[in-house]
Image: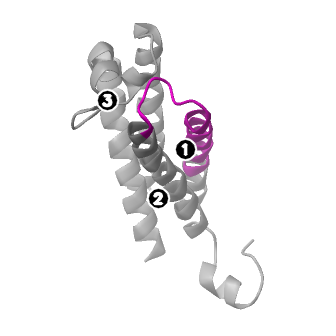
């Protein structure tokens, strides 16, 4: 059951990163102006626009998307842990930046933008814990942290 949850989580994360990556790489100006969509313009809140950096962000998202997709399809715990650790590093640094930089966003948009970044941190961390041997809750019930 845990393996299925991890694989679904990896697949979902991969899909999001591949979508954002393709968008940012293929249409960097559009991505910069309109991300995340739905009437919000969060990336544009960090001017100035730079085509090279936005396309590089797209390449980064595409790379991370592939690294997350592989263990979703061909599950190996060590590979899942490696890709989730990479995602966790990226997500931690990304959140840290946005916690300390509001750009030109309103407080409401800045706060709303932090919520998916927090999810982007909690999801890979949770999935990473689920890849560990043994049952996580049993370790806590025994009064010790899981190894």
Q: Is 125 drawn above or below residue 29 in the view shown?
A: below
Quarter of the image holding residue 50? top left
Q: Quadrant of the C terminus?
A: bottom right
* 35 on left or right of 50: left
The span picked out in magenta is 84-107
Q: Which mark is residue 75?
A: 2
Across and down, in percent, residue 40 comes to 28, 33
The mark lying in front, picked from 3 and 1, is 3
Q: Quadrant of the N terminus?
A: bottom left
Residue 67 at least partly seen: yes
Across and down, in percent, residue 112 comes to 40, 45
Farthest residue to the left: give it. 38
Q: Earlier in the sequence, mark 1 or mark 2?
A: 2
Quarter of the image holding residue 23? top left
Q: Secondary structure at mark 1?
A: helix
The mark lying in front, picked from 3 and 2, is 3
Specify the principal SS of the magenta part.
helix
Q: Which residue is mark 3?
A: 35
Q: Secondary structure at mark 2?
A: loop
The crowd level at tag 2 (other Cα within 10 Å; few <14, some 14-19, many 20+) is some
Residue appearing at x 42%, y 39% in the figure: 65
């Amino acid at each position: 059951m845990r393996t299925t949850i991890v694989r679904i989580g990896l697949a979902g994360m991969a899909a999001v990163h591949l979508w954002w990556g393709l968008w940012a790489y293929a249409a960097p100006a559009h991505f910069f102006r309109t991300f995340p969509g739905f009437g919000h313009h969060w990336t544009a809140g960090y001017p100035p626009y730079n085509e090279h950096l936005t396309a590089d962000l797209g390449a980064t998202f595409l790379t991370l998307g592939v690294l997350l997709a592989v263990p979703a399809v061909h599950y190996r715990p060590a590979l899942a842990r490696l890709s989730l650790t990479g995602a966790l590093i990226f997500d931690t640094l990304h959140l840290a930046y946005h916690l300390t930089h509001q750009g030109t966003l309103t407080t409401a948009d800045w706060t709303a933008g932090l919520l998916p970044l927090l999810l982007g941190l909690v999801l890979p961390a949770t999935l990473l814990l689920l890849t560990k041997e043994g049952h996580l809750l049993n370790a806590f019930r025994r009064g010790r942290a899981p190894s």
